[in-house]
Image (cartoon, grey):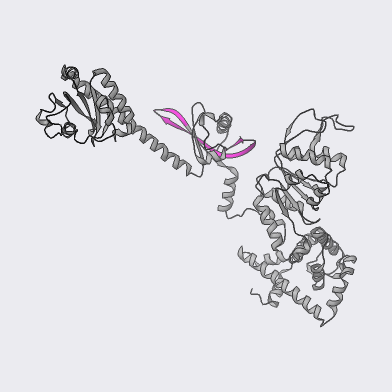
Amino acid sequence: MSLREIQESVQQIAWAVASVLRVEVEIADTELMRIAGTGRTQAGVLHTMAGHDHIYRSSLFAGQPVVITRPGEDDRCRPCAHFGNCAETGEICCPIMLDGQKVGVIGLLAFDQEQRERLFSDVSSILNFLQKMAELISIKLKEHNMYVEQQLALAKLRVVMDDLDKAMLTVDQVDRIVQVNQRARLFLQLGADDSFADIDATAWLAAIREADQVQGTPKKVTLVIGQEEKEFLFSIKPIELDGHIREWVITLDDVREVVEIARQVGGYEREDAFSVILGSSPAIQRAKDMARRVADSDSTILLQGESGTGKELFAKAIHQASRRNAQPFISINCAAIPEHLLESELFGYEEGSFTGARKGGKPGLFELAGKGTLFLDEIGDMPLHLQSKLLRVLQEKELQRVGGAGKVIPVHARIIAATHMDLQERVAQGLFRMDLFYRLHVIPIHLPSLKSRREDILTLANGCLAECAARLGKPVSGFSQETQAILFHHDWPGNVRELANVVEYAVNMEVYTLIQPASLPGAMVKNNSDSLRSSRTVGSEEQQDELLALKEMERMAITKALQRVQKRKGRKEDAAELLGISRASLFRKMKEYGLSK
């Protein structure tokens, strides 16, 4: 409690008293620092009163007013440095008290005969007035202290609110926001510097109050944040004072976060959208890791890779792993649709825009995708005149239907494009717009060919075999050693798509439980005839190397499967399922390779 904290207010009071009494005024704190002054004393404000403070010390010590009619001669002035030679002609002072404690002293000073006469004309009245001024200063200090305590309490409240896991805001009776914590700012997309007066929360609060009236517990509300709809669990409670509701406290929980926490607490791991993409090679893992990192972004993705490498599978996995997964996933192959139809398919058309146009028009795929994902496959085959229109849509985030009369439709879908072509080479050839290339090439992800990740071939083949055998109802459980060698050494120009087709063909042809080379497509067997002949030549060095390599791969595959199952505390049967072999085959192989059960 220091008068220095209200120095400006104290100085204003000093000037007011001086103008009424027409004498000089001086106010000091308990350390005898001059807090305010007028006339001759004003120059010493915020300086100590060393050598000039004896009478003030006496008043503070006694807690009583002091009246000095003859400064420099009064015995009480004897310790003063100016005793016998004082410029003052009179002085009256009294202490300033706050809740029984001394906080300062206020003094009235005369420096000539006129001021002296005014000061002592009615000492009793002057003293009474001076004490009232001391009380006024005390009240000002008390108000200041209460304000500081209030601000400190608010600061503490902000710290506590910001530390909550819930979003919290308080609103008054006319639905004005009074306070929000950091989490509420995040949920409601409010800037750190946004003034509460500038925030229009009318629609949010109306939705919350309506939901509160009609719902039981738990309560859920959908709020429009920006251009998105988000679901929250909420509570709304009144703050009462003197029997009247003054404000309301609202808490919000993001429904998606609550569900995720429930999954974790319940011991359920969130399903990995990329688990459908089989393979553990470094090349495919790099592609999956990159796709996972950017799945929840809104940035455009360009998937590049040979035909059959699983570009649409990747696009669907990215969509499923994103916050858009509840919205549509729309796919179009730009190379499979005739050029004259592609524009209307993408952008839609209005009624009467061309012969045969549907009555009422038709929305395009951009509109149908809504706030979901639009997958543009084989983007490299898109005609040049459509490339410019696509570029404009990507830049402006809006479109016009074919035949539209100026009506603009906003675009909210995320774009994932894919191609097997070298787009930079297409740009150099003048077949693809450079500006569109850079607009699409924000996050490029390369999908490796099958021959560049041969360690995944048998894993993929076993996965295809299990699915196909179950669908066709055939008791085929694996591949013979010779067949595995053929599959491993084939170059797979059609990649995973070709592999799936070969396996389905073989399952249809096979009459035994293990697929034999004879059940593979004829062209594939012919191309690998040299490998087959070498495998039948007992003792050949080439065959021995091949068998050793194959066995080592098999041992590594079994080891990895066992480690994966052990990590998630699963059963050996799960490892057999991962490998696409029977339980008996797994235990036989484990024994053969000396792997512990």
Q: Is residue 305 left or right of residue 323?
A: right
Q: Residue at x 83, y 49 (%)?
A: 429
Q: Quadrant of residue 522?
A: bottom right
Q: Which of the two residues, 227 or 138, is positioned nearer the viewer here?
A: 138
Residue 450, above or below 184? below
Q: Quadrant of the N terminus?
A: top left
The residue most toward the front is 85
Magenta part, dominant SS? strand
Image-based side of 190 in relation to 144, left or right: right
Residue that appears at 58% across and 46% down: 257
Q: How many marks?
A: 0
Front residue of 145/373: it is 145
Q: Nearer the viewer, residue 123 or 585?
A: 123
Q: Which residues are magenta?
A: 219-247
Q: Quadrant of residue 543?
A: bottom right
Q: Is residue 263 above or below residue 582?
A: above
- Place of residue 222 in the rendered image (x, y in percent of width and height, measured from the top left): 61, 36
Quadrant where the C terminus is found in the figure: bottom right
Residue 567 among magenta residues: no
> In the image, residue 558 lies at what x, y percent?
69, 70
Q: Is residue 378 visible?
A: no
Q: Position of residue 176 (x, y in %)?
A: 51, 29
Rendered residue at 67%/77% (across/down): 594
Q: Residue furthest left?
A: 75
Mark yes or no: residue 51 visible: yes
Across and down, in percent, residue 370 comes to 72, 39
